[in-house]
Amino acid sequence: MKVFVTGGTGFIGTRLVASLVDDGHTCTVVSRSGANRWTSDRVTVVTADPTVRGVWQVHVGEADVVVNLAGAKIVDPPRRWTRGRKTVLHESRIATTTCVAEAIGAAASPPQVFLSGSAIGYYGLRGDEPIEEHEPAAGDFLGGLAAEWEAATQPAADTCRVVTMRMGLPLSPDGGILQAMLPLFRSGLGGPWGDATRWLSWIHIDDAIALMRFLIETDVNGPVNFTAPEPVTVHQFVKGLGRVLGRPAVIPAPALALRLALGESADALLHLQRVVPRRALEAGYEFRFAALQPALEDLFRSQKKERPVGRS
């Protein structure tokens, strides 16, 4: 199987490519830097800016599967959403997705499936009710960004199966928001933020990769929530993390303080929701880590760079 990947040098993309290559597939990764993080001759890195149309799009039409993981980080590190920063967040997602989708639509032999990134920020601030994929997009910045991100896949919809991956909080000590939180928690300065009774929807990194692999082979289209079946409250999350690290997790970060420090970008930390993976479960995917505590214990039992990828 030939797989084309954008965002392949990110912490999720790197693991996905390694998983595919380990199973004998070949991957073409488009990267601005041209960095090759793999030692396998099954990986080809194309140096290009995926937000701009170019020769790199030819490789899209040569693939059996396309996975689009491109997108500037929302809150890592935490920073204000200035007009310039919002432009970066927007262009890195919508422009890239548009270029990839257009290449798929124009391909003489289009790929079988297009997996494209999205996020549960789509749903905005919600209450205690579990949220499934049929819920509408929120009207805030993150909701609008995710909705436009998904809409940008449309040029590919007439030629191949399209799945939009609404990613929850992917947990790994080697990347993402968990890695950013560890220094505070390990020093005993971690604790709950905002309203600690709000829900946090997470997914173990192994399940995130395995679910992508599952969706490549399964006849599913449209949005899929990439979250574990058992979301937790912020309080439960920090308590579980503190327990695994053997550190107290009681120093709060009030919502007002986050607002003063980060402005509108605090939405990414405060606009939380209780998201459940209905479509993944209905399709038959079996989560390796459905509950938080076993997931955290697994992540911190071994922090090797190359972890075994969970299977469905």
Image (tube, helix red, strand yellow):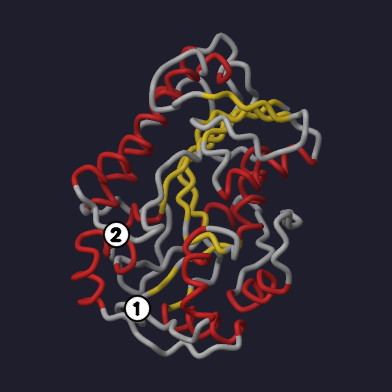
The amino acid type, in three-letter code, at marker 1 is Trp
Secondary structure beneath dot 1 equals loop
> Which residue is outermost to the top?
108
- In percent of the image, x 64 and y 71: which residue is there? 295
- In percent of the image, x 54 and y 24: which residue is there? 47
Secondary structure beneath dot 2 equals loop
Could you say where residue 127 lies in the image, as x and y percent from the top left? Answer: 31, 72
Q: Closer to the camera, 279 or 227?
A: 227
Could you say where residue 220 lies in the image, as x and y percent from the top left? Answer: 57, 40
The amino acid type, in three-letter code, at marker 2 is Gly
Q: Which quadrant is home to the N terminus?
A: top right
Residue 124: assigned label: 2
Could you say where residue 12 lies in the image, as x and y percent from the top left? Answer: 58, 49
Which of the two discs, 1 and 2, sits closer to the camera? 1
CA–CA distance in space, label 1 to label 2: 17 Å
Q: Which residue position is annotated with label 1? A: 193
In the rendered image of this protein, does residue 292 appear above or below residue 276? below
Q: Closer to the camera, 85 or 27?
A: 85
Answer yes or no: do the residues labelled 1 and 2 have beta carbons within 8 Å? no
Left or right, 232 with reference to 194: right
Residue 308: assigned label: none
In the rendered image of this protein, does residue 220 appear above or below residue 264? above
Task: Estimate how packed mark 2 is, as few (under 14), some (14 to 19) or many (20 or more) residues with alpha carbons within 10 Å.
Answer: many
Q: Which quadrant is home to the C terminus?
A: bottom right
- In percent of the image, x 69 and y 26: which residue is there? 2
Quarter of the figure with residue 215: top right
Q: How many marks?
A: 2
